[in-house]
Structure formats: C-alpha cells, structure tokens
Amino acid sequence: MALYTIADLHLSYTSNKPMDIFGPKWENHAERLRANWQSVVSPGDTVVIAGDVSWGMRIGDASADLQFIESLNGKKIIAKGNHDFWWGTMKKLYELRDSIGAQSIDFLFNNAYYEQGFIICGTRGWFPESAYGPEDEKIVNREAERLRASILAGLKIKEEHPEAELLAFLHYPPAYGGVKCGRICEVLREYGIKRVFYGHIHNAQRSMLVHQTAGAKLVLTAADKLDFTPMRIEREGICTIS
C-alpha cells in the first residue's frame, strides 16, 4: 500500500468547461487520468488531491465529478483549490459525499489524517500574481491559521504514530518566482515541515520554480505537470512518478 498525490484535476462532467482550450495537453484529460490512475494506484492505496477538483459553482454541481473520483482506485483525500467554488462546510461536504455514495472520499479542511505511514496536513493557501498587498493579508492570515490547525491535528495523531512524517499539501505554492507567502512559510518552519506538495501552477517555467523554502522541499504536482499520473510519495524522501 502506498501514498500518492496529484492536483488540478479540473473535472467538468456537469459544467461546460472543456480543458483543451488551454492546449492540446489537456485533450481528453479525464480519460487519460483514469487510465493512468488505475494503472498505478491500487485499491489499498491513498491519493491526496490538492485542490481544483471540479468546475462546479454550487455544491451539487460537483456530484458527477466526485462520482468520477469515487470510481477510481484507492482512498482519496481532497483539499480545496481556488476554483473549487462548490466547496462548502464539512457538514455539507459529507452530506454530498454520502448522498452519492462516495465513501472512498474524505476532505482535508482544518484536520489531518494518518495514511500509509504518513500524516496528511494542509490547506488551500494563498498566492498573488505579483507582490502581496494589504488586501491579501486577511486571506493569508486565515489560511496560515488553517494550516496551523491542520498541523496541530497532525501532531495529535503523531502522539500515536511517532515515526510518521507530517506532510503538507497546499493548492497554492508557498513560493514561486520572486514571491513568497511569508505567513505560510512561517508556519511550515515553526513546525518543522520537511516536504510540501502543491498545485495551481500550469505551464510552469523551470526558472520560476522554488524547490526549497522555510526548511521544506517544495514539489509541484499539478496534473498536467505529472502527465495526469498520480505521483507516489516515498518514505525516504524521494518522489517518483510510477
């Protein structure tokens, strides 16, 4: 059994949002995702999906997309992305999940999970196009505290599993190009997080990628970056595409 991750599935089984408008790499991406996912992920594995799951605007709009995810192998833990406008309270998320019988899905939101020998923590995060401004501070502070709450929940789990590494999953990168989210990075450093997996960035310029910040290794896991194949997370700190 193993832990995998991927972000930015951008499913649109209910919404009219064909992704191939963003380039040929996205043509038939859901079918390719299914084939690749099923070829590497086993029923006993776990996959963390770091945001931008569905283009649905209301919570019910995501039903078909979540049913697609339910049909894939493994347990899935979903975090929120910037395009997940369908996202609601945990109560509403689980009501939706239960109403469609998607019992292999859980949600990462101010909480943490012990899976496959790892402790899963995370939040959406925040990242502007250029420099941070006053309008960003409220959002940044909220997301930093959500990350802290998730890590604290993870530390409670660690009391029972002291050998387990805490991993952080964000949708937005904590650093990219010449911009860094200081508050998020402060929390990562405070709790000694060593690996962060994030999405959001498409067609990333290699020169803009930041591979380490606040003592943590940063790994981009956007679906198009991974050729729509979930990436296995190794215990020894090596990330490989299976």
Image: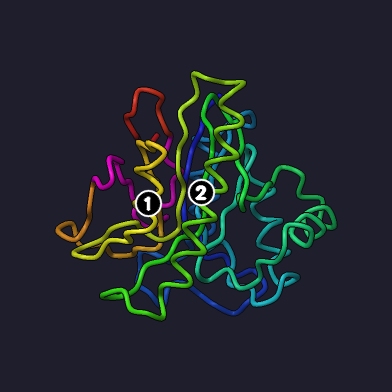
Q: Say which of 149 and 219 sits in front.
A: 149
For the point 33% across and 61% down, which residue is it? 181
Residue reaching furthest to the left: 207
Residue 106's spot in the image, x, y percent? 68, 46
How dense is the environment of label 2, judged by Cα within 10 Å: few (below 14), some, or many (20 and up)? many
Residue 122's spot in the image, x, y percent? 51, 48
Q: Secondary structure at mark 1?
A: loop
Which span of residues is magenta-colored?
Answer: 212-232
Q: Which residue type does callout 1 highlight? A: Asp
For the C terminus, which image quadrant?
A: top left
For the N terminus, which image quadrant?
A: top right
Report if residue 220 lies within the magenta region. Answer: yes
Report if residue 83 lies within the magenta region. Answer: no
Residue 202's spot in the image, x, y percent? 33, 64
Whether residue 6 sits left or right of residue 23 in the image: it is right
Residue 101's spot in the image, x, y percent? 82, 50
Per the image, the residue denoted by label 1 is 227
For the point 44% across and 66% down, which residue is it? 140
Residue 125 higher or lower than 16, as above or below: above
